[in-house]
Image (cartoon, coloured by chain):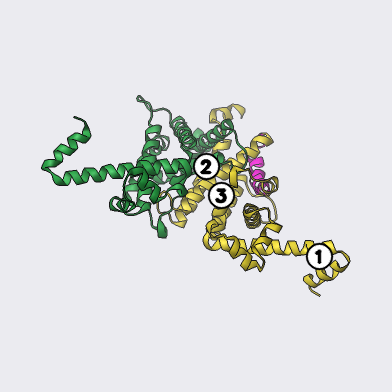
Chain colours: A green, B yellow
Amino acid sequence: MNDVQKTESDSVERPGAKTSARRADLRARLVAAGRAAIAEGGLQNLKARDLAAAAGCAVGAIYNVFDDLDDLILRIGADTLARLEHGLAGAPGPAPEPAEELLRLSRGYLSFARANKALWRALFEHRLAGGRPAPAWYLEDQGRLFALVEAPLARLLPDEPAASRVLLARTLFSAVHGVVSLGLEEKLAPMSEATLEGELERLVRAFAAGSTARPCGEASRKD
Amino acid sequence: MNDVQKTESDSVERPGAKTSARRADLRARLVAAGRAAIAEGGLQNLKARDLAAAAGCAVGAIYNVFDDLDDLILRIGADTLARLEHGLAGAPGPAPEPAEELLRLSRGYLSFARANKALWRALFEHRLAGGRPAPAWYLEDQGRLFALVEAPLARLLPDEPAASRVLLARTLFSAVHGVVSLGLEEKLAPMSEATLEGELERLVRAFAAGSTARPCGEASRKD
């Protein structure tokens, strides 16, 4: 008996569960259809009519399982973030040196952006109608990603207060994102893969070295 | 006699000049109308029909003085870059310390972006049809801006080869742009003006310190 059959038979005794499973299934199909549409043609390729056709439902059914298209786009974004998080997971074993770990994460981010350009772009291009802020559940999903950056920062800057480190992780992410983003889009100059990777490394190494830099005289006094 | 009358009377003897002045005037009016449209509602607010009405010409006349709307948008972008360059001009007198100068430029960039949000966004959102690269004249306009960053980098890193410094200026700009961009759009978290300015300063100071950092042992050996 496969999972779908199991859900169906379970629901004979629990009618609410059947409806709930059907809704979850439709949501998943709509997220998959939306993801495919964005991957193919960006956010502007996301049309309610096409999504409904791809998911095999009426257009109105979309709004039974999502508040609006913004809500669906946020779910697709959360799915992209989860894939990015999975791609950035480190190897098991002892943690590498903080600067090396920051570099590994930055390179992973560049690779992900390069391989998933349209979905990655959509994360930043999408603005909620009326300038609403992103909902708490979405910010929590983002937060798990930033935790990956906070961990090596905590080892690099053990005296940094936690609140300041949380901000710094977002600042470093933003800086890396700027280099990846303008580089991949070739906004400033044509840029080979090797050059972009080299520049990203220069930025991250300078940041890591400069964040811990103390005037040499000061270090000497401590010796 | 004002400038317009002068142009008109001059052109009695040089009919080509009259046409040329009329074309230049129409171009300027269309750029002004386009800039106002983008400032009001972003790139998607730029409509040929509205521009023609605002500039007092037929829709077809737009395409007599610009290759296409992309060409007009690039001219508006060049105008934005010129305003940014003007805003970033330093005070006369001796050049400040390189790190302070980089910080001054970064803060100037943040202020400009904050005060001209839609026009600044349009610089990065606009993509030429068919993925064409930006024309040489536009890249030259951009280049003058990066020269402002290259000057303090040359003093910070006197041994850096020129080609590498040219790249590094774009990398630092991209990093600063990332922090400004995700911060102003509040993509990662709500962010006060003071916090954003503080984070920008942390990035630029770490970058400047880390770019010149040598292990203290090495410096000692040189002493």
Q: Is residue B66 above or below residue A183?
A: below
| Residue B13 percent across, percent down from the top left | 89, 66
What's under tag 3, amino acid-wise?
Phe
A9 vs A164, nearest the viewer: A9
User: Chain under label 1?
Assistant: B
B103 vs A102, nearest the viewer: A102
Q: Residues within 10 Å of mark 1 (few under 14, many from 20)?
A: some
Say which quadrant the C terminus of chain B sits in.
Answer: top right
Inspect the magenta stretch and tell me whether residue B158 lies in it: yes
Q: Are both tags, 3 and 2, on one chain?
A: no
Q: Is residue A167 left or right of residue B69?
A: left
Write down the quadrant of residue B168 in the picture: top right
Q: Residue at x 30, y 45 (%)?
A: A27
Residue matched to label 2: A181
Q: Residues within 10 Å of mark 3 (few under 14, many from 20)?
A: few
Question: Considering the numbered disc 2 on the image, is that residue within a helix, a strand or a loop?
Answer: helix
Q: Who comes first in sequence, dot 1 or dot 3? A: 1
| Residue B164 percent across, percent down from the top left | 64, 35
- Asked if one can make out residue A163 in the rendered structure from this viewpoint, the answer is no
Disc ID at residue B18: 1
Residue matched to label 3: B124
Say which quadrant the N terminus of chain B sits in.
Answer: bottom right
* Image: magenta residue range: B142-160
